[in-house]
């Protein structure tokens, strides 16, 4: 089983009949978004969105979609809609593949590398880099 920085991903990723289930602890209202390591037996994820009107849940699913390189439609909140501790179902992937992709994403996060994610849609065009954040403008 992949282990990153002392965190055994087998504790956070399990199989069910229909999908792979990922145990997540969410920190809403964070200053930056990303995977933050372990929180007990769960994967800790920071999102900037506040925990109101489901905005943090939506941000969590978008972030996991990007980090796992899967369409958002293959992720669903299975439990913990009003809690920081959540269960996210990942359809169409094997446990080993989810663990492998999370290990790579955690390694990137630990290295401080924003690098290419499997699901990135921003691409370099004609020498100009697409904006990484709202408000940033490509230099031309």
Image (tube, rainbow, N blue to C red):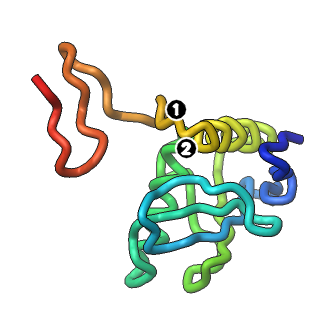
* Up-down relation of residue 92 to residue 44 (above or below): above
Q: Residue at x 44, y 59 (%)?
A: 32
Q: Residue furthest right?
A: 1
From the viewer's side, name the closer residue of 51 and 14: 51
Residue neighbourhood size for the residue with mark 2, other residues' Cα within 10 Å, grouped as few (<14), some (14–19), many (≥20): many
Q: Please tell me in which quadrant of the rendered image residue 103 appears.
A: top right
Measuring from the top left, give residue 27's x and y in whole percent: 55, 72
* Up-down relation of residue 135 to residue 21 (above or below): above
Q: Residue at x 61, y 78 (%)?
A: 84
Q: Please tell me in which quadrant of the rendered image residue 62 appears.
A: bottom left
Mark number, residue 92:
none
Q: Give the distance between the C-alpha atoms of the residues marked 1 and 2, in whole angstroms.
A: 7 Å
| 68 sits left or right of 95 in the view | left
Measuring from the top left, give residue 47's x and y in whole percent: 47, 64
Q: Residue at x 17, y 32 (%)?
A: 138
**Marks 1 and 2: CB-CB under 8 Å?**
yes
Q: Which residue is mark 1?
A: 118
Mark number, residue 67:
2
| 107 sits left or right of 140 in the view | right
* Up-down relation of residue 17 to residue 39 (above or below): above
Measuring from the top left, give residue 124's x and y in whole percent: 28, 21
Q: Residue at x 82, y 52 (%)?
A: 7
Mark before the other along the chain sequence, 1 or 2: 2
| 24 sits left or right of 31 in the view | right
């Amino acid at each position: 089983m992949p282990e990153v920085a002392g965190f055994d991903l087998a504790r956070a990723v399990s199989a069910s009949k229909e999908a792979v289930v990922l145990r997540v602890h969410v920190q809403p209202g964070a200053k930056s978004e990303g995977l933050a390591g372990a929180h007990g037996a769960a994967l800790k994820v920071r999102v900037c969105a506040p925990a109101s009107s489901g905005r943090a849940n939506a941000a969590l699913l978008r972030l996991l979609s990007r980090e796992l390189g899967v369409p958002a439609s293959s992720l669903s909140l299975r439990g913990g809609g009003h809690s920081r501790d959540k269960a996210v179902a990942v359809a169409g992937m094997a446990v080993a593949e989810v663990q492998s992709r999370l290990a790579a994403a955690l390694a990137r996060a630990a290295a401080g590398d924003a690098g290419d994610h499997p699901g990135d849609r921003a691409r370099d065009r004609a020498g100009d880099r697409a904006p990484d954040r709202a408000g940033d403008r490509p230099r031309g």
